[in-house]
Amino acid sequence: MAIYLALDAGGTKTETIVHDETGHILLRNITKGCNAMDMGVEETVRRAEYAIREASRSIPGGKPDRAYCGIASVDYYGKKLRAALRERFLDWKIRWEDDGWGMITSAIGAHDGCCIVCGTGTSLFARVNGGLHHIGGWGYLIDTWGSGYVLGREAIRAALRQADGRGPDTKLYKLVYDQLGAPPETSIPTIYDGGRPFIASFAGTVFAARRQGDAVAEVIFEQGAESVAEFTHAAERYFTGSFDVVLSGGIFAAFPEYAQAVQRKGSARANMIRPEVPPVYGCALENVLADGPVNETPFRTAFMKDYVQMKK
């Protein structure tokens, strides 16, 4: 029986699965995120290699029959990133793609469609006739509006504006204070040392404050949802008629009200899908699709049964 390795890597975490051709999971590992926009190509390659080799220790002979790796930022750093990774796995059958491709596959199989990634960062991928088109997500220094990073940044910013007397009082101040364990205005080194994933971890304070009726949090929420919904309007040019859009990523998963807001504000032609499987499932499915047609129902059932058990 063939043994495969599937890897999905974003800004916050890297998830690696070892599975067989029936969908049964033999190993699930979580390691540090690897996104070259955050840490550069060299560190991204180091982390990806570590995740792959750690998981492969569970495979007889230390190498899978095939591997599929979806890594954030391959769309930008593809040539350099792929070349560096291939050097480390010269005799392996590995497909290296941006994480968006596998996320689309996770919900709609091999069909054309889109995926909005909304986690630490945010962007839209449109898969059309075997090609992948990228909208938005031009890095946190330029454009990642609506992402966990921007939501967290705006929460901290609102708390600091209150502390300065430049902005209105907001429930975000106490929520940010409690998460930091110290006043925001005395925690700047901690915030900057933590970097983008740490700042993104404060996104939850926006949703908590909004549920408490906070006006500042409501504005941040609405602006973020509007920014993400813009992707679906821009994606219309790639399709005739309706098209599928998979709403993927940690923010959508943790805060369904955000996904609902994006659905309300998005293109009328977009059929937005909330996936019932993790993105790494799409990577696993790509593995077996590379070897021929797949009866996906039993494959998905076996995969998700094991995945749920391993998450407990």
Image: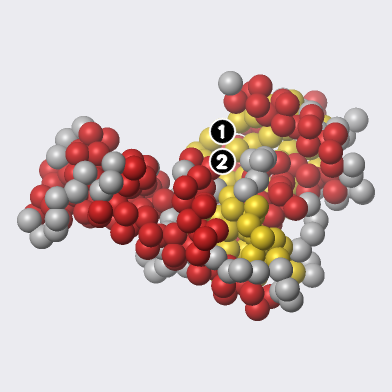
Q: Quadrant of the N terminus?
A: top right
Q: Quadrant of the C terminus?
A: top right
Q: Which numbered disc covers residue 14? A: 2
Q: Which residue is at a point 25% across and 39% down the rendered structure image?
A: 175
Task: Classify 135 as above or below 277.
Answer: below
Q: Nearer the viewer, residue 262 or 50?
A: 262
Disc 1 target residue: 30
The amino acid sitting under disc 2 is Thr
Q: Can residue 276 be seen at all in this image of the molecule?
A: yes
Q: Secondary structure at mark 1?
A: strand
Callout 2: 10 Å neighbours few (<14), some, many (20+)? many
Whole-percent x, y for residue 220 in the image: 33, 57
Whole-percent x, y for residue 297 in the image: 84, 38
- Closer to the N terminus: mark 1 or mark 2? 2
Q: Nearer the viewer, residue 251 or 229?
A: 229
> Across the whole image, how many numbered discs are drawn on residues?
2
Task: Classify 147 as above or below 265.
Answer: above
